[in-house]
Every structure is written in C-alpha cells, then in structure tokens.
Image (spheres, rainbow, N blue to C red):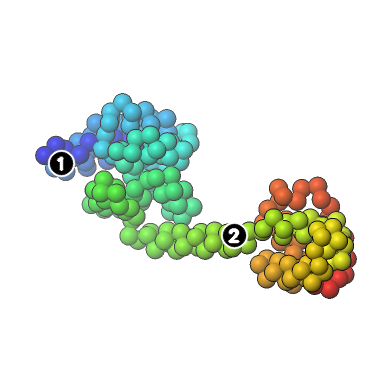
Amino acid sequence: MSAISIAIVDDHPLMAEGIASVLQRRAGFAVAATGSNAGDILSIAANHQVDAIIVDLNMPGDVFQAIADTCRDMPGTKIVVFTASTSTEHAMRALDAGAGGYVLKGSPANELFEAIEAARRGEIYITPSFATKVIGALQSKALEKQAVDTAKLSVREEQIVRLLLCGKRNSEIARTLVLSEKTVKGYMTNLMNKLRARNRLEVVIAAQRLNPASFVGLGSPTRQPVDQI
C-alpha cells in the first residue's frame, strides 16, 4: 500500500520542519512538498497531487480563499488546518471553505494523524477540546440563517414597506396598490409578526435592516404617521 502523500504549508520554518519530522516517523506517511504562503497551497495541489495539505492560517495571502480554490479545483486533495487560532469564526470559515480538519497547535500528534485520515474519508475532524465551541457556533449560525430566511419579505410586503417609508397611511396604501384597507391591515399584521415589530415605525426600521438595498433613497422612517395597524 502506497504512503499517504502530505504537503505542509506554514510560514514558520521550525514548525514546518517539526511537522515533517513527526510525519516521517509515522509509517504510511510521506512529505512530498512544503510551502510558506497562501499561494503555495493551490500551487502544491496542482503540481504535486498530494493526498492532503496541512495548512496554517496565519500566513501571507488569503488562506481561506486558497483553501476554497483548492477544494473546488482539486477535490482529491484534502485540507487540514493546523493552527494556533482558537477563533470559532476562523474555524467556521475554514470548514465552510472546504477544510476537512481543524487541529489546534499544541494538540497531541495523534490528532493530526486522525484529522488527515478522517479528511481522506470525507469526514470532518476538529480538535475534541475545541469541537464543542465550533459546533455551538455552527448551530447559532444555522439558527440565524433560518431566522433571516423566515423573515424574507414578499414582493407585496416590500411594496407596502416602501409606501410606509413615504409616510402613507393604510387607506393611501390601499388606493395605491388597489387593495382593500382590510387587506392592507392584514399585511401590516403579518409584517409585524414576521419582523417582530410592535408598530409601523419598527416595521420600517426592521425591514431596512433586513434588506437595506431594497429601500435605498426612500426617505426616513421617523416621519411615520401615527396610524392604526
């Protein structure tokens, strides 16, 4: 059985040499290339066809983009992040970019081996002591996305918000959109529930925060009339 071909990209020579030494002492692993910046990640993947690349995050260049490009263009080459960063944001960005492992420097060498093997199987490995934080952050991100998706406005709701921004009352909105005033009140109730707003002013403010580009140049929400729902 051929050895697992590994590349190491880290701008600290001593760290790169240390990782290489650990890998070379492990049966079944072979170090094929090294690099020291983000650009080397994709270059090594293209020219050496390695099984996995161990990548530090704190290097010159856009490492996250390099990870994404490599995972997209060279799906057979797996990326394992080996970093001192305990930022859950960094971990999520690396995993979103396609990294198959996130191992903290200072972890036992066995964790790095496990991460490489897991990534090659198509699994994700995160340093166990850090995994709970990352999973919690990923869950929070998923809930936030779900909330945003739920709060998306329909075309008609956006029309109503635009008219609210112009200071229109329900009766005026109804005439403009050729709707009954009762229908407009129904839309207003739905908007308040969807945007968790207590009144017309909060509806407008929440809608602008949700999608600023849709309501550019349409006036200030502070000029809202005091009106019933």
Q: Which residue is mark 2?
A: 148
Q: What residue do we see at 22% from left, 42% from top?
A: 22
Residue 223 in the figure: left or right of residue 30: right
Single out the residue that lies furthest toward the left. Answer: 1
Q: What residue do we see at 59% from left, 63% from top?
A: 150
Under circle 2, the secondary element is helix
Mark linked to residue 28: 1
Residue 36 percent coordinates (x, y): 38, 32
**Residue 11 in sight:** no
Amino acid on which disc 2 is placed: Val
Mark 1 burial class by Cα count in 10 Å: few <14, some 14-19, many 20+: few
- In this view, the mark in front (2 or 1): 2
Residue 2 percent coordinates (x, y): 14, 37
Amino acid on which disc 1 is placed: Gly
Mark linked to residue 46: none
Residue 21 in the figure: left or right of residue 202: left
Mark 1 and mark 2 in contact (Cβ < 8 Å)? no
Q: Is residue 44 above or below residue 124?
A: above
**Residue 227 in sight:** yes
Residue 133 percent coordinates (x, y): 43, 61
